[in-house]
Amino acid sequence: MMRKYGLSIDNIIEAELVDVKGRLLNRESMGEDLFWAITGGGGASFGVVISYKINLVRVPSSVTLFKVTRTSKQNVTNVAHRWLQVADKLDNNLFIRMIINVVNTTNGEKTIRATFPSLFLGNITTLINIMDQSFPELGLQTSDCQEMNWTQSVLRYFSSPPGSPDSTLLSRIRRTVVHLKRKSDYLKKPISKQGLISIFNKMVELERVGFIFNPYGGRMAEISEFAKPFPHRAGNIAKIQYTLDWTEYGVDIANRYINLTRVLHEYMTPFVSNYPREAFLNYRDLDIGVNHNGNNSFFEGSVYGVKYFKDTNFKRLVKVKTKVDRDNFFRNEQSIPTLPSAHH
């Protein structure tokens, strides 16, 4: 629902944090700078966040879901190309994700498959009208769509079988245990059909790495990039997530798979954001920079910090960090560093 309501961080109204001195602070006692920092800047750099209070948003009593797939035989390049043109401009009530994977055809050849899982905050009739006007290339049919309540849509979206009880959402048990690697990029301009073909060919060559494109636009483009540490707002068509999951054990196997994601990430350089090449904090991609939290910590921190937060927000986070945790007690391999002069 981010295209309708922004992110969870945009809807946080209160927080509790234990600071480096062991004090329990709320929004008022911590002040707006620190509150700003822990709503998108990674709370672990500043203290121990005990709780967040999040504003509720309205959802209709009934929502509509669809999930359709297209393969190379079904003009996947044309459909994907059109998605890049429209996904961030669609009705704010409509979120269409695009997942791209390499699959085997019936005769064992590798091919590209795009999956479009979607949530629409409204009914089927309205959705079909929007799709016929804005994205006819997908060829969405009424029979592809299902109306249900929002709770059921969450369960369905995240792969519970139809009709699972609502209480499934309270389960803390992981159903699958896999190893995984995630990377991210931001897409500022649509990729040409020729570009898509070359990317798809590269994916087939690598076999294992997939993409998930999350559409931005809507409410995401209306919120100022300085309102929260998270800066990826107007001007972004989508966030790209690189995905690779595996079940085998062993460091060598892990390194081989992780390297595949790096190869595709490198290949994507001409198509995505640059100076800085932006990234999404939640995927914690250590490939884009690591902090040893020594004398160089500010400069090491700037390498990934500017990618996650862009320059202005990163500098503001560093200021807050220096003020509330001068000795860098709360630190990790990608935490917010203090200003270099803080240690003298």
Image: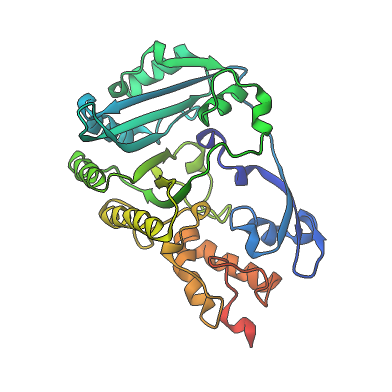
What colouring method underlies this structural image?
rainbow
Inspect this view and state whether residue 236 appears: no
Residue 39 picture location, percent across and down: 63, 53
Residue 332 occupies quadrant: bottom right
Inspect this view and state whether residue 218 appears: yes
Image: 149 above or below 193: above
Image: 77 above or below 131: below
Viewer-closest of 2 and 282 = 282
Residue 237 picture location, percent across and down: 38, 42
Image: 342 above or below 29: below
Left or right position of 163 against 277? right
Left or right position of 51 against 321? right
- Residue pictured at 64% horizontal, 42% vertical: 11
The N terminus lies in which quarter of the figure? top right
- Judged from this view, the residue extending furthest toward the front is 249
Residue 58 picture location, percent across and down: 64, 27
Image: 217 above or below 265: above
Viewer-closest of 329 and 159 = 159
- Residue pictured at 65% horizontal, 57% vertical: 38
- Residue pictured at 44% horizontal, 67% vertical: 289
Viewer-closest of 141 and 87 = 141
- Judged from this view, the residue extending furthest toward the left is 194
- Judged from this view, the residue extending furthest toward the right is 23
Residue 276 picture location, percent across and down: 38, 62
The C terminus lies in which quarter of the figure? bottom right
